[in-house]
Amino acid sequence: MDYCFSPFTYRKRETREVIVGDPSNGGVIIGGDNPVVRQSMLTADTKDTATCVQQTLDLVEVGCQIVRITAPNVKAASNLQSIVEELRKRDCRVPIVADIHFLPSAALEAVKWVEKIRINPGNYADKKKFATREYTDDEYQEELDRIEEEFTPLVLLCRELGRALRIGTNHGSLSDRIMNRYGDTPLGMVESALEFARIARKNDFHNFVFSMKSSNPKVMVACYRLLVARLNELGPDWNYPIHLGVTEAGDGEDGRIKSAIGIGSLLADGLGDTIRVSLTEDSPREIKVCNDLLQQMPALISTSPVANPPAIAWDPFEYHRRPSSVLPLMEGIECGGEHPIRVIMTRDGFDKVSPRIRPGADVRPEGIYEDLGVLEVDPREDFDIREGCIVTVRDGLDLPVITAFRMLACRLAAKDASNPILLKDCLSFEATPLTPEAALLRASVNLGSLICDGIGDLILVRGESGAGRSLELAFNILQAAGSRSFKTDYVACPSCGRTLFNLQEVTARIKARTDHLKGVKIAIMGCIVNGPGEMADADFGYVGGAPGKINLYVGKTPVKFNIPEEEAVDRLVDLIREHGKWVDPHTEEDQAGHPAGAMS
């Protein structure tokens, strides 16, 4: 199955156009030859018309082209009429999307007032109770018939009113029916979306896009690749546009890195027609990251064809790390094999940071480039390989980083060579140093894309101007990609009208108490829509259960209910203690919010 034109040469995927609103009067066209569309979501209660209008205007001012508003029930959906009317009075024509979970009745009300409806197949007329059950083929078909009966009225109204639709699956909210047949897998996400797409097509409705969102970039990338490959198999008229996003990416640098890995990797392969960066921050900041990411992409791709491209040496639809031999780096540190991906620095960088590294720190160089005898090659040419050495791409080549290292992995596979590969975030340096924001996004896309391919045993970050920042960025990329764990990992959803507490404030409070817990993963969820599912691989979860009340989870199992919000962070800490995951911060610096083991 093919998911892109070529893993070595950029070509944007050809799609049909999806019309959202009136393009001659503020609407947009997704897909076709049109630029990638940027979108975001309101954080206000949908029944609060004034705040929703103001947040929409704020988003439009910074370049948001589609605004999404949650509609958790019919009452909220009906107030979309007031919001849209007030926006149009102010001559704001931005298309509005109603975000629907659970209630077809809310969708049927919302579609009257907005230009687009987003439904989640995992919970639209379907169940999510983590129930285990075997379905016979007849029973499974009965469920599909029931879903068709519930979904068809919305499809017919979308067609009649000229609305657009997003069929958006989430890794955290696959239905029990899908989970029992396909498991918690990319295939399950794809099949869940295709079931709803077939109903739309059966009713001659084609004005829809797909999305496959996950908080895990590796899962997200695999899902989108598999989706596009399946659409290609189904035929040329299945060329629907794609909405990209990493859900529950969190905030700050970690949220930006995780989003850049997932979204940027797919954009670099020519996939994606509209994007949302989901941050636990004020929504206008999401558009800034969208703009910055899209601005960096031309420097990371090439449309020039590669002569005699090698055969693909990895499975693009399921993550497997490339097998490699084990080699020593520094005293007590090895790379390759089952060892984690190592972080390397140049001699100059090492000399600058080593005096500031605390004894026993996790964030520290694990090798010095000049001391490793690295073999530097041009992967477009044949080269002799020797055992017992690390291999990388030579600097100065006129190749995108992703293309160059994919070719290197393929060339080594053709030679049956298992040498460890050292990845670089750049092969040349800009005349003017990159801004920290640009350096972060470029390194995250380049290195993250290759890590999601299973390529790489060591990484070297040089695009950042500061040695200490380069070292921290390298570790943060590995953590965001799920390849190393040197600090607490957070899965935090962006705010929306369903959120039952102030996510930004609560996330900050939880981080202040827990960000020294190396290797612990904590999910912070505003409501139950994606919470239990996205927390499946988290150790602990903090979830809004009702206004002012919090439920606490261990994995995806709720264990404490209806805790008053003012007590909930303390109770979360108690829960971590009960399960033997708590350690006391060792220094005042750790308590102030610095990861344990970082540079002083």
Image (cartoon, rainbow, N blue to C red):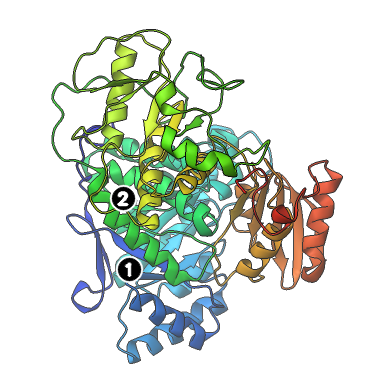
- Residue type highlighted by circle 1: Arg
Which residue is tagged 2? 272
Residue at 13 percent across and 25 percent down: it is: 307
Image-quadrant location for residue 284: bottom left
Residue at 28 percent across and 72 percent down: it is: 21
Q: Position of residue 457 (x, y in %)?
A: 46, 25
Mark 2 vs 1, N-terminal side: 1
**Residue 515 versus residue 448: which sits nearer the camera?**
515
Query: Could you tell me which secondary element the residue under label 1 belongs to?
Result: loop
Q: Quadrant of the N terminus?
A: top left
- Residue type highlighted by circle 2: Gly
Can residue 451 be seen in this snapshot? no
Mark carried by residue 163: 1
Q: Position of residue 446 (x, y in %)?
A: 35, 40
Up-down: is 121 above or below 11? below
Q: Position of residue 469 (x, y in %)?
A: 47, 49
Image-quadrant location for residue 389: top left
Can residue 268 be seen in this snapshot? yes
Cα–Cα span, label 2 and label 1: 21 Å
